[in-house]
Amino acid sequence: MWGKYLDAAPKTTFGDAPKVIQFYDNEEDADKHAEMVVHDAKRAASFSLLGLQCRKEALPKIGSFLIIIDGRGHARCIARITSMVLKPFFGIKDDFVRQEGFGDLKQWKTFHWEYFRRELLPYARTPKDSMIVVQITFEKVYN
């Protein structure tokens, strides 16, 4: 998919290689959220800063590309990061939750608390209300 995108938009060949990303840690959620990006119903994502640090991953970079895959590893689309903000878990707002494709803040918090709990468990860490969440927004550029 990346090669086809580069053929369609050759000026992007000067950027860094894209990061391949699957949303969440199970096939069902990965499929659902990849599909939401394909249909422009999801334009944002959240990561725990602690999870990124534990895995020794860099912070997302504005302007970088993401190849979004489904739960079986199939590329569904390419997106480009347009913003990145660090916020405490307790500071997440409704407008961002809607961009991420969730119905309301309570639903987002319940879902992400459980996801962050599972993500941090192998590192003997637990989520906290004050934990820092990395919020990105993106635009779909190819599918």
Image: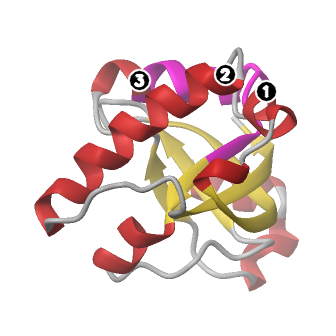
Quadrant location, the C terminus? top right
Circles 2 and 1 in contact, beta carbons < 8 Å: yes
Name the residue that disc number 2 marks: 102
Q: At label 1, which amino acid type do we have? A: Arg
Name the residue that disc number 3 marks: 29
Residue 136's image quarter? bottom right
Q: CA distance from mark 2 to mark 3?
A: 12 Å
Q: Is residue 96 above or below residue 86?
A: above
Give the camera-side residue of 111 and 15: 111
The residue at the point 44 percent across, 22 percent down is: 31
Q: Nearer the viewer, mark 3 or mark 1?
A: 1
Circles 3 and 1 in contact, beta carbons < 8 Å: no
Name the residue that disc number 1 marks: 98
Give the camera-side residue of 28 and 105: 105
Q: Is residue 126 above or below residue 103?
A: below
User: Residue 123 at x, y = what percent?
Assistant: 16, 68
Q: At label 2, which amino acid type do we have? A: Phe
Q: At label 3, which amino acid type do we have? A: Asp
The residue at the point 76 percent across, 85 percent down is: 14
**In magenta segment, residue 34:** yes
Q: How many marks?
A: 3
User: Residue 11 at x, y = what percent?
Assistant: 87, 73
Secondary structure, mark 1, is helix
